[in-house]
Image (cartoon, grey):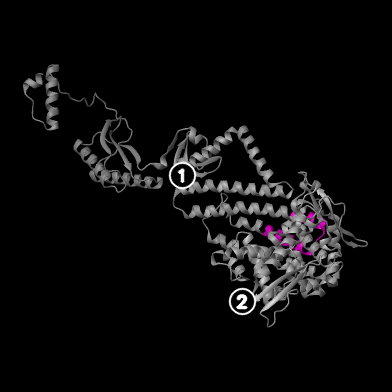
Amino acid sequence: MRHFSRFRLFFRFHLLAALCLVFLLQAPAFALDVNPVGQAFVDLHRGMLAYEKGDNSLVDTVFARIEPPKNVSASQKDTYLLRTAKKLNLIIQNIDFDPVRDIPEPGDKDHLVVQLGGRDGYNFIFRMEKAPNGKWCFSTGKEEDVILDEMYRKIRNHLDKMTRADMEGDTFVSELSSPYRTTLTLRSGVRGFGGYTLEDAVQTLDLEPLSPAVRDTLGEIWAVQLYRILAYRSPLNFEQLSADPATDSFPVFLVRPGVGIITMNVYTDADGTKSWKFTFKSMEVVSAVYDDFMTNGMAKEIQYSNYDYWAGDVPLHVMVDDLVQMNFPSLEQKVWGINGWKYVCMAVALLLIPLLCFVVGLILRRLARMMPNLKRDDGGSPVLSLILPARIAIVSALVLNTLLVVTTSSFLLQSGVFVLDLLTIITLTWMGCLVVEIGFGFFVDRTRNRTQDTMLQVVAQVVKILVLVVGLVAVATLFGHNSRNILAALGIGGLALALAGKDTVENIFGTVMIVATRPFTVGDYVVVEGYSGTIESVGIRSTEIRTLDDSLVTIPNARFISQPLDNRGKRSFRRYQTTFGVQYDTPPRLIQAFVEGLRELIYEHPLTRKNRFNVYIYELGDSSIDIWIDMYFGTNNRSKELESREKFIMDAILLAERLGVSFAFPSRTIYNIADNKPEYRDFQDSDTAGKEGRKIAREVMGLPPDSDEKMEM
């Protein structure tokens, strides 16, 4: 039964996904279905927009749409074409026309005159001709150049008119210096003309009452909706707007009884500059009347004039609303005051949230199994730690985008978007720190160079700090603070902390010196300030040492540049000193054989230093004859050293066993002199005793007897 329920859920989900796919496939293509003549306008405008942004890849396409006169020399051809293209583009982007609707079909003609009318009654005339390759081009020549120059001067006069600064005009923002200029900026930003973007269009709106978190998001939606209402429902002629910054005439673009009016006013910014902007109350009117206008015919007009959306950006809310209006108008019907398609969006989001959370968890668990060596201090996998923040980020992103799609209510957006944006920033910062830990941990696990391991650990700490700083700046920006001011404050605050926290600065400098001079690496065995152990990790402020007692000692990095450091991990050879004590009753020749055997063991050992070792009878101890051994093992690994020691000692024990040498142990022998009194040799005098001693010594050493004269000396 459980499997059947899962199957039904699986079937319903894929059915809904299929319906959504059909919904998207029914969406209108925003590519222009223009005739060959209109395509010449589109290609020239698109290529010149790219050229103005520094992209020269479409210049040849632009030049192919202009037919140069025959009297232009080859050396002057490119200059002529570029100058002509600039004039044509300036004219095209400053007149209202639709390349689909306003440009006639050429039919069988090879020449065509296209007239595009302005709102002031002036007709812009373009002469077109079919090139030998079959494409339509702009005609040039003496007569055509005169017409082009006249149209160009007309546009320049308009631009001079709208950018002049009389009276207080020098205090105005140039793009918002008058009702005419502000409206032109709105239109150019929405339609993507002249290098303007939707962000520029948002600047024409007074959004000060909104919280900083939703100004850009809601501003983009309102900018597009406002432009559409002005373009298709406003009775006010664009050319009637004043270009005087000091005008007392406040334009009224639309009056909606019971709702309000769409107008603009002069606003003074914090820096003292002034701007003509559409009022916030006008945005509330736009939000209230937009759906009614779209339902009552404006959507059809937009569909027939899709040039407005070919060049500009469309916010997600407007895009989804357009798809519904133009393909499924029945979903615009309201249920309990909410459009039907918004219920569909919310249902899709509710289905996607658990699905995506499950998929993310599945992927991260599989990734954790692929990296079994990547562990945290508590033994857990950092990859699995990503599951929770990733799911929170998915939920926040889906809810946020759903909220942006289904509502334009400033109250809901200000409260909801702020919380969701804050939650998203926190979780992304959290995820960023975890990803840094995972990424650098992966490289540390793969590398076999301990120096690189140390540098990677330090770099990982620095990157984590940068991620936290970026998150802090993003949160502060969400509260309306300027990011530049925040970074400047961080710089001043850092200087203050540096002056107040001398030890912190010293530790950071110590970290820099550790990375630069590399006195040790992760895994080295060091002795510093009385602590000895293995370097486990190197951080921005301190270094952790794992002692032989398995305790973790944290030492500030400043100590490593101010105190002596004994890095035993850098040794090429490890010294080993020991003493073998043999019993006093061991024959001398047997002791000599044992000593030579020990030397041979050292010489034949695979990891010993052959040119520097000492094996000698060292001294007569309290209970043994001591043989001193000073040798070196050629390894920098502690385990290898202990293994080599063990082999040497075991070989020495076996050697002693084979030779019959017995090792002495601390003991005390008590003799009863009365029962076993030793007999000692006696000499007549000290001279005789000396001569006898020297004689026997020479015999022991294998030397010939000395003459009596030498002995007397």
Amino acid type, mark 2: Ala
Can the viewer see residue 623?
A: yes
For mark 1, give the secondary structure: loop
Residue 406 is covered by the magenta coloring: yes
Amino acid type, mark 1: Thr
Residue 695 is covered by the magenta coloring: no
Residue 204: percent from left, percent from top? 78, 55
Q: Which residues are magenta?
A: 391-419
Q: Nearer the viewer, mark 2 or mark 1?
A: 2
Quarter of the figure that contains the C terminus = top left
Q: Is residue 511 above or below residue 397?
A: above
Q: Nearer the viewer, residue 613 or 164?
A: 164
Q: Which residue is mark 2?
A: 131
Can the viewer see residue 547?
A: no
From the viewer's perspective, tell me whether residue 509 is left or right of residue 585. right
Question: Is the residue marked by circle 1 packed among few (<14), some (14-19), or many (20+) residues within 10 Å?
Answer: many
Q: Residue furthest right?
A: 258
Residue 508: percent from left, percent from top? 55, 38
Give the alpha-carbon distance from disc 2 to disc 1, as whole Å: 72 Å
Q: Nearer the viewer, residue 488 or 275?
A: 275
Q: Which residue is mark 1?
A: 521
Q: Quadrant of residue 296?
A: bottom right
Instruction: Give the residue drawn at x 66%, y 56%.
Output: 389
From the viewer's perspective, tell me whether residue 711 is left or right of residue 400. left
